[in-house]
Amino acid sequence: GDSGLGDIAPVQRPAKAEANASCRVLAVSDSAVVLVWSTPCQPERATVRSLKDDGDAVDLPPLGPCAVVAGLPRGPESAVDLRWSVQGVTPSDGGSRFDAVLVEPVQFHKPGIILLLHGGPHSASTTAFDHHIPFLVRSTDCAVLSVNYRGSLGFGKQALESLPGHVGQQDVQDCMDALKAALNTGVFDEGRVAVVGGSHGGFLTAQLIGQHPEVFHAAAMRNPVTNIVALAATSDIPDWAFVECLGLGSYDFGGRQALTADALSKMLSRSPIVHVDKVRTPTLVALGMKDRRVPPSQGL
């Protein structure tokens, strides 16, 4: 197409890259482009592709060890005997489908399963290699299910905008729908289910162990949002509390925002703190004592 920058042409995925692999452009020159691709079970590999008509490509050697973990393999060996897939999930409310990335041990019979929940909420879990995931799988003999609940990036505007005004409800149910779909396969041990997340992922972790205490046997949350009312008054992004809880158009970015009684009531009702009396899951809470986005008071 004509962008004013010259001709634009799609760059083909490297030949060795698996279907659904994550691929990104690392560098571009007049004659070549450097592509980096990876999967949840394959650390990054680089390919240099010619931009000339023949489009020849050269695969560079592996980039070397990706992590150093005491007692566990490092580099590409960290993902040996693991497999991954992208699971499509149909939400129970009939909304648009979303994805979850599953990484599981190949040889372990009846592994447990860990929900890994991204923050934002408007970000996403990709199929790029992340050494934390093979570490979790290999050190716990559990699969890891990274859920791209509706509101995550990359699934269209309608899905993205379906979440504001419905946090603590729609996103929580999406996580449960993804988990139930995995458990219904009969592959995973329902007695070894855990949930992990930070920021909005911590918010979801707190919601899940409060709303579904019978499901989760362990949890870990980093800088979790537990009280939206308090967050609105203490965070450096108070708009999050308004937009995500009250909906699009609820925050005046050009002036000071008043908290009405109705807004306070809704914020509190969507906060994990209202479910705290039902929590019985052993939970690790990690806090950043200088975090201005989610102040440590949210977890104390």
Image (tube, helix red, strand yellow):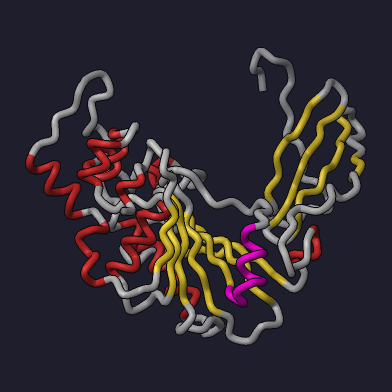
**Foreground of the two, 174 or 283:** 283
Residue depicted at 86% across the width and 29% down the height: 32
| Residue 94 in sight | no
Q: How would you classify the magenta stretch by its main secondary structure?
A: helix
Q: How many marks?
A: 0
Query: What's drawn in magenta, residue-wise?
Result: 132-142
Magenta residue check for 147: no
Quadrant of the image occupied by residue 107: bottom right
At 82% from the left and 23% from the top, the residue drawn is 29
Residue 232: x and y in percent read: 24, 38
Q: Is residue 66 left or right of residue 205?
A: right
Q: Is residue 170 rendered to the left or right of residue 199? A: left
Horizontal side of residue 184 vs 47, given as left or right: left
Residue 107, above or below 103: below
Question: If the image is split into quadrants, where does the N terminus sit?
Answer: top right
Give the residue displayed 43% in from the left and 64% down from the top: 284
Query: Residue 22 at what x, y percent from top left?
Result: 68, 49
Task: Judge by depth and name the residue closer to the eye, 194 or 283.
Answer: 283
Residue 142: quadrant of the picture: bottom right
